[in-house]
Image: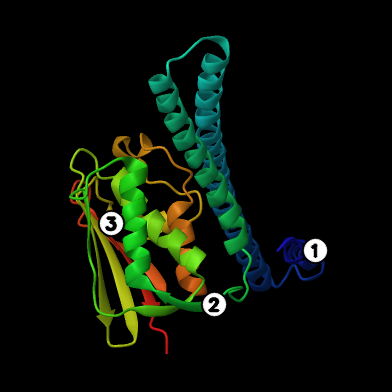
Amino acid sequence: MGAVLIVVILLLYIGWVVLDWQRGIMLFFGVLLLAMIISGVVLNTIFLVREIRRNEQHDAFINAVTHELKTPVASIRLYLETLQTRAVDPAKQQEFYRVMLEDSSRLLSTIEQVLRTGRLSRVGRLANSSPVDLNALVMECVERSRTLHSIGDDCVTYSPGPKAEVAGDSDELRAAVSNLIDNAIKYSGNELNVHAEISQVDGKYVALRVKDRGVGIPKTELKRIFKRFHRVPGPNTTRVKGTGLGLYIVRSVAKRHRGRAWAESEGPGQGSTFVLELPLAT
């Protein structure tokens, strides 16, 4: 663009001296130069705005990760200092150990999220592909979420569907399903009612649907939420801690397994449905 602008400017100067009588040609080059300058300014502004938004997302990600790492470390350190400096009765010790284990699990989960994002961002074939029973995997993730969030069986329910076997990496698929369920729990608000179900689509695909009755998603954000570091703005979502990587991992895993992932919502306060669709193993 810069080289073309320089050439047009030189032609204008040369033409003004040599071709002064052909004002039509000069007008043409003048209009062309003006259009190119305007186009350059518009493109520069678009790229600048994108870079500003990207930097804001990176800053938000760094702040979120810092909080997610610092909070459990500070909690574990506090309990360890308490156990070291004073006598604690056995019952209280067991409670301290339980809290420290929960904080260490939270810390490990955050680290795994960041590391998994780096691995999934590199395009390539699946390293470990084998038959995976999606019904059993989803049931395992549901049980894990109940234990992790200390909630009852009626808060997160699951309706097993027909036989659903997919070919893929069990660890990646487990991470995707866990992120969908954890995401639904985090954004359920005061009405914690998450339901997961599996169904076949055209005999070729299997679809996992995770529904909640939480804060909902604006129509304009339904596609953006799967971008890396992106979090829906608003008081109902910003107060929920997270790294902004969960749904990005879900979409990346779906693509690596020749499937897709999308979200459905009627708007804020109307709840959400996340769908993970994968091809059946042949």
Residue drawn 48% across and 59% down? 249
- On the picture, is 188 further left or further right than 249? left
Which residue type carries mark 1?
Leu
Frontmost residue, 149 versus 94: 94
Q: Which residue is mark 1?
A: 10
Residue drawn 57% across and 43% down? 58
Circle 2 packing at 10 Å, graded few (<14), some (14-19), many (20+), is few
Q: Which mark is residue 279?
A: none
Q: Tell me which corner region of the image, top left, top right, bottom left or bottom right, holds residue 62.
A: top right
Circle 1 packing at 10 Å, graded few (<14), some (14-19), many (20+), is few
- On the picture, is 30 further left or further right than 181? right
Q: Please state the horizontal and vertical placement of residue 60, each as a whole percent of the image.
A: 51, 38
Residue 262's place in the image compared with 152, above or below, is: below
Residue drawn 50% across and 11% down? 87
Which residue type carries mark 2?
Ser
Which residue type carries mark 3?
Lys
Q: Which residue is mark 2?
A: 129
Q: Please state the horizontal and vertical placement of residue 118, each as a whole percent of the image.
A: 61, 56
Kindly report which numbered mark, 2 or 1, lies closer to the viewer in this rendering: 2
In the rendered image, the quadrant that contains the C terminus is bottom left
Q: Tell me which corner region of the image, top left, top right, bottom left or bottom right, holds residue 13.
A: bottom right
SS category of the residue bearing label 2:
loop
Circle 3 packing at 10 Å, graded few (<14), some (14-19), many (20+), is some
Q: Which mark is residue 219?
A: 3
- Is residue 276 visible from the viewing direction of this image? no
The CA distance from mark 3 to mark 2 is: 35 Å
Q: Please state the horizontal and vertical placement of residue 247, each as a whole percent of the image.
A: 43, 56
Kindly report which numbered mark, 3 or 2, lies closer to the viewer in this rendering: 2
Disc 2 or 1, which lies upstream in sequence?
A: 1
